[in-house]
């Protein structure tokens, strides 16, 4: 059984002591995946961002707020896991600096400078072991979803990527496609609930992970 590391939910990047830049991710996809994996008996760790839904009971839970906190947790936990499913909606841009205290309207116009955040998956892929399986999520406009998701799979050196249309954010149902490193494009049955999609996804990922492990075994002397 693979030891699974799942990330879920948004990041919050502070602007000042009370404000942040976040996103609309509910964390329900990663929550459903971690719940289903734990139900199957997979040793599961869920890195969970700031969401309102309660954390599931089965997996081990660690909480993060910012992308940097998530990066630190990933660096710590990834070496002891076999599979990573990166469902968290990590900030792509973060404020260049955090204002100490609370900004006041009386200070007048405010200009925020955002800088690109580090790509956590790409950084982890550089130090991965050959027996580890890495899975990303791509949320894109439906029109160019397959091409952009396939490009992300390659660019981030992943084993598989879940291609999701933008409408999936905050929706209860999923209409997603799983693209794999060897060029397979597997469509999930339409309109699955997030828990049903999680079960479908883990069935496929277990097969992909077995393939990764057996090709690693074959390459041993
Ligand atoms: N991701 C990450 N680190 C980031 C941003 C995203 O590891 N700073 C991960 C997400 O968790 C997801 C995958 O990368 O699994 C794709 O995220 P996405 O935001 O769609 O990709 P980007 O690399 O940010 O690509 P682009 O900005 O070109 O859409």
Image: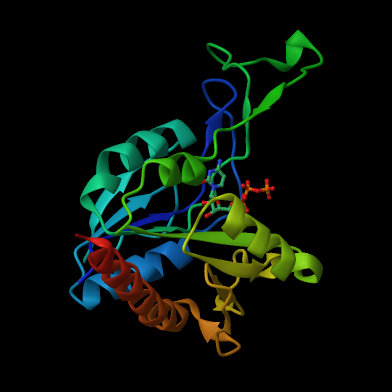
* Left or right relative to 39: residue 175: right
The picture places residue 138, in percent across and down from the top left corner, at: 61, 60
Closest to the observer: 192 or 2? 2
The picture places residue 93, in percent across and down from the top left corner, at: 64, 34
- Taking 153 as reference, is 65 above or below it? above
Residue drawn at 23 percent across, 70 percent down = 38
The picture places residue 192, in percent across and down from the top left corner, at: 53, 85
Total of numbered circles in the picture? Answer: 0
Closest to the observer: 23 or 79? 79
- Taking 161 as reference, is 47 above or below it? above
Residue drawn at 22 percent across, 60 percent down = 220
- Taking 144 as reference, is 118 above or below it? above
The picture places residue 199, in percent across and down from the top left corner, at: 38, 81
In this figure, which colouring scheme has been used for the structure? Answer: rainbow
The quarter of the picture where the N terminus appears is: bottom left
Closest to the observer: 221 or 40? 221
Q: Which quadrant of the figure has residue 35? A: bottom left
Residue drawn at 37 percent across, 50 percent down = 48
Q: Which quadrant of the figure has residue 221? A: bottom left
Query: Is residue 10 in sight in this rendering?
Result: yes
């Amino acid at each position: 059984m693979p030891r699974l590391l799942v990330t879920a939910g948004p990041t919050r990047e502070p602007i000042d002591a009370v404000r942040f830049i976040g996103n609309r991710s509910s964390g329900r996809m990663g929550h459903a995946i971690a719940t289903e994996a734990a139900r199957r008996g997979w040793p599961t760790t869920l890195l969970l961002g700031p969401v309102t839904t309660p954390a599931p009971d089965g997996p081990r839970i660690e909480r993060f707020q910012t992308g940097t906190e998530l990066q630190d947790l990933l660096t710590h936990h990834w070496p002891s896991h076999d599979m990573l499913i990166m469902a968290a909606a990590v900030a792509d841009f973060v404020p260049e600096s955090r204002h100490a205290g609370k900004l006041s309207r009386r200070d007048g116009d405010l200009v925020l400078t955002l800088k690109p955040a580090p790509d956590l998956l790409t950084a982890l892929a550089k130090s991965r072991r050959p027996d580890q399986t890495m899975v990303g999520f791509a949320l894109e406009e439906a029109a160019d979803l397959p091409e952009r998701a396939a490009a992300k799979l390659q660019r981030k050196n992943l084993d598989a990527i879940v291609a999701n249309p933008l409408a999936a954010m905050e929706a209860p149902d999923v209409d997603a496609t799983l693209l794999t490193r060897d060029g397979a494009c597997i469509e999930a049955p339409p309109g699955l609930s997030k828990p049903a999609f999680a079960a479908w996804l883990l069935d496929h990922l277990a097969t992909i992970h077995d393939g990764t492990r057996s090709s690693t075994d074959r390459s041993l002397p």
